[in-house]
Each structure stands twice: as structure tokens, then as C-alpha cells.
Image (tube, rainbow, N blue to C red):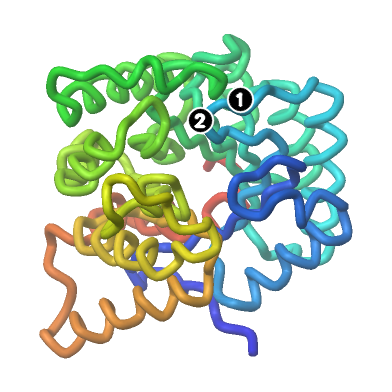
Amino acid sequence: MTRPAAGPGEGRTLVMGVVNVTPDSFSDGGRFLPTDAAVAHGLQLLAEGADLLDIGGESTRPGAHRPSLAEELARVVPVVAALATAAPDAVISVDTMRAPVAEAAVAAGARIVNDVSGGLADVEMLPLVARLGVGYIAMHWRGHSADMQSRAVYADVVPEVCRELASRRDAALAAGIAPERLILDPGLGFAKLPEHNWALIAHLDQVIGLGHPVLFAASRKGFIGKVGRPADADPRPADARDVATAATSVLAALAGAWAVRVHDVGGTRDALDVVEATWAARGGRPSNATPQGTADTDRERLFFHPRFFLHGRD
């Protein structure tokens, strides 16, 4: 059964479905590497209620090695093009740190660039996104996957992440990216130990306080697999982490996150629908839990709704 995506002005946390087009994904082990499998999976996520799709051709799990530019292009662009053709109303995000991949994916139909490096991995990325006029997600990042966990050193993780993420926000705006098209991501699991991730979840309001919509991406990550387990026990397998992931998505919605990036779209929609039903029974969503960019102006309401990205800058 197909579930409807959000309508304009609904003011709820959106669901971004993940389509990994990699042979070494921690969550699905390359199941969707063939283009036809990836496209079918993306269409299934839309049917389950995804508001956006995030297509990525580079694994960013700890220790992962980067594919070549040619490999990433070959993985990503055909999937973006096929999904944009099969589902022309779908809002597609491309998960890449490389400007040439972003440019090719936008030409193929992507409307958001999800850059886990926040523009640090490729100096051409921010000017390119500004020129293209598409949405841009800037994540907190300290280095590539091969050695990023060696950089998980913080005196006080929440203010440090907020400061470093604010610097990427400022760089994006200085490059000419429109403020209403900028989204921030605290980068759970990237150069962070489990205690760092939980602190950021507990204080997500401080990230939201940076003044831009926030993407929350905890789905199936290692720290989720360890929660509730003895210290010396192995983490749960990735595909057994969806219930715990849904709990973090609820926490993100309560804090006012713009969207949650997840592998299990149907379960997440169910969990977030419970939040909305509860708020409806209370008479409406509290103002401190309203996703950033949903209340003040027509432009902000358009921005909140993913269809905003299907149109030009003005």
C-alpha cells in the first residue's frame, strides 16, 4: 500500500529514505548495488511513505576506503536518472562529497546535495551548489572514514560540534548558498564515540538553535547496535537496529528535527505518526518542537516541504 508524503503546511518531521548503491554498506551489504535493484528499492521506500530519497555511492562507515570518481559516478547517476524518470514528483538527494558527482546527479534529477564533509572534502562543492541553486546538507565532519575515529576527541562535544558546524554554515552562506536551502547535520557516528552521539541526541535543540533545519541520521549506526547490550557483547546486527532507530527518530521529532534519514521508512513513519497523533490529541505541536523553517513565512513553509526543491531558487 502506498502511503502519502507530507502535504504543505503539515509541519511534521520528514522521512528521508536511504538508497545505498555501494558494495560495502554496513547496513545492507551491497544488496542494492545493481541499478535496477536500487531503483526498485527507492520506489518501495516512496510507497512506504518516504518524503525524500538519499542516493549514495560511497560508503562512509568507519574504516571504509573511497571509490574512484568514475566508480562513484557509475553507481549513482544512473539510479538518480532512473528514479527521477520513474517518480518525477520524488525529491532526490545525492549523498556525495565530490563536486563532479553532485553536478552530474543534479543534471540527472537530484535536487539536494547531502555532503557529509560540509564542503571540506572538495573546495569546489560550495560554489557549485550555490551556482546550481539546489538544497545543501552540511554535516559536521573531521576527516575521511579511513581514520575519522582517531579524531573523536572532545572536551565538551555538544558546543564543539555546534561551533564547527556553524563554521561550515558560515562558509556555505559566504559561498552564496541561499539560507533557505541550507540544512545542517550533527554527524552522528562520524568522528564520534557512542557517548558523543548520545550527548548530541540529548542536546539536539542546541544544534537546531544554529538557525537552520536539521537532518538527524542515526539509522542502524554502531552506537545504536550497542545500546542495552553488555559492554563486552557484540552489537546487534545492522538489520536488528530498526526499533532502536525509530526511538531515536521520535526523540529527534520531539526536539524539532526537520527530517530523519533512515533505512526502515515504514517503521519510522509509524513511530512519527504516533507522535503526531499524540500532539493532535493535546491540541497541536508545541512551538519548541516545530521543525525549523515551518512557521514564520510562506518561503519557510515552502522550504519545509520537500517539493520546494523541485522549483527554482525564486
Are the residues tagged 2 and 1 within 8 Å (C-beta)? yes
Q: Is residue 110 above or below residue 68?
A: below
**Mark 2 element type:** loop
Q: Amino acid at mark 2?
A: Val
Q: Examine the rendered structure and indicate whether residue 136 appears above or below residue 5.
A: above
Q: Secondary structure at mark 1?
A: loop
Image point (56%, 50%), residue name:
309
Can I make out residue 299 in this image? no
Q: Position of residue 197 (x, y in %)?
A: 28, 40
Quarter location, residue 212: top left
Identify the residue under disc 2: 116
Other-residue count near label 1 (Cα within 10 Å), few / some / many at <14 / 14–19 / ≥20: many
> Camera-side residue: 67 or 312?
67
Q: Nearer the viewer, residue 162 or 129?
A: 162
* Alpha carbons under labels 2 and 1: distance apart: 6 Å
In the image, residue 275 above or below residue 228: below
Q: The N terminus is located in which quarter?
A: bottom right
- Which of disc 1 and disc 2 is earlier in sequence? 1
Q: Which residue is mark 1?
A: 97
Q: Quadrant of residue 113?
A: top right
